[in-house]
Amino acid sequence: VQAVEVRGICGSPSSTCGNTRVGASDSIGTMTMAQKDANQVVVGVLALQGSFAEHASSLKRCGEGVQAVEVRVAAQLEHCDALVIPGGESTTMARLAEREGMAKALREFAAAGKPVWGTCAGLIMLSDKAECTKQGGQALIGGLHVSVIRNFFGAQVESFETKLPAPACIRVQGDDDHFRAVFIRAPAIADVSEGVEVLAEYHLSDVQRQRKPDAPSKVAVAVRQGHLWATAFHPELTSDLRWHKAFADMAREVRAARAAAESQSASCPVHESNGYNRMELPIYE
């Protein structure tokens, strides 16, 4: 595994979920795109704010063939096969993306069919609609046809973790039928449109239902819509790598399919007519 960090902005040292970091450590160094290994799938991690360092660390532990890149400027997206949008503070992340000129590039990346996985705040940013946002609203990347409720489970002190049944896409990565889900001031998926597959649901506890008597008894907390993934919890804060491995596998499959399509297109002969319309040429019998 080749771990690299692409530097675009100078700033402060690394920090974890909820804090902003727009700089980079000198311990890893700067990547030139000539160093990209053609045999590796390159998974970018949006590194404007939040738990991007934890995601990058998880990806680095996924074994050979996965290259983790911290992404801070729009140009770096061109070299990524897939992208992770980490947990953190979605409003701050969106404002930083706008300030650094990345918002448009992020929307185009997702719309182009490249895999994108949003966790917690990343789920909010990927969604088409977000409720309970801060005053003034919330800028979104969109593309994932769901509606989410920001801070659904309450404040920081009401964060929790639990075990949930593992969906098929991560069960193939290991023998455990369940996975550990860490919810930190987490959103919930209130509504999904046709074409969105629910991968995991959470049943509210009695205490949570007392706090939110009007809430449904269960909510979706992980979904998949084609090349877009989203989880309300934080797999990067556990030692379970199955979510990251499954996402990297999907990125590899999508890259292979795109390469095959491009190769087929390039192999099709182009017939030149020297500027003449064939239908206008005389026909002799």
Image (cartoon, rainbow, N blue to C red):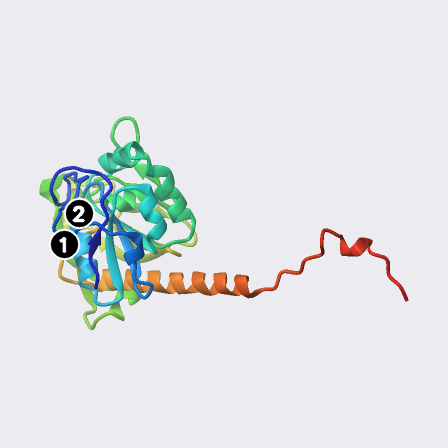
Which one is in front, 232 or 206? 232
Q: Nearer the viewer, mark 2 or mark 1?
A: 2
Q: Residue at x 49, y 64 (%)?
A: 263
Looking at the picture, which amino acid does disc 1 mark? Leu
x then y, percent, for residue 34? 31, 56
Q: Position of residue 184 (x, y in %)?
A: 15, 46
76 on left or right of 159: right
User: Is residue 263 toward the left or the right of residue 30 in the image?
Assistant: right
Question: How many numbered discs, if any?
Answer: 2
Name of the residue lying farthest toward the bottom: 175
**Residue 196: % across, % down:** 39, 54
In this orientation, does residue 47 appear? Answer: yes
Seen at 30% across and 62% down, the residue is: 37
Separation of marks 2 and 1 at Cα, in angstroms: 9 Å
Q: Nearer the viewer, residue 261 or 238?
A: 261
Q: Nearer the viewer, residue 51 or 180?
A: 51
Which residue in the protein does label 1 denote? 237
Task: Return the disc, 2 or 1, that comes first in the chain's sequence.
Answer: 2
Which residue carries the number 2 mark?
Answer: 51
> Label 2 is placed on what type of residue?
Ser
**Callout 2 environment at 10 Å: few (<14), some (14 to 19), or many (20+)?**
many
Element at badge 2? loop
| Residue at image point 22% right, 38% down | 9
- Residue 17, given in percent of the width and then of the height, sits at 15, 44
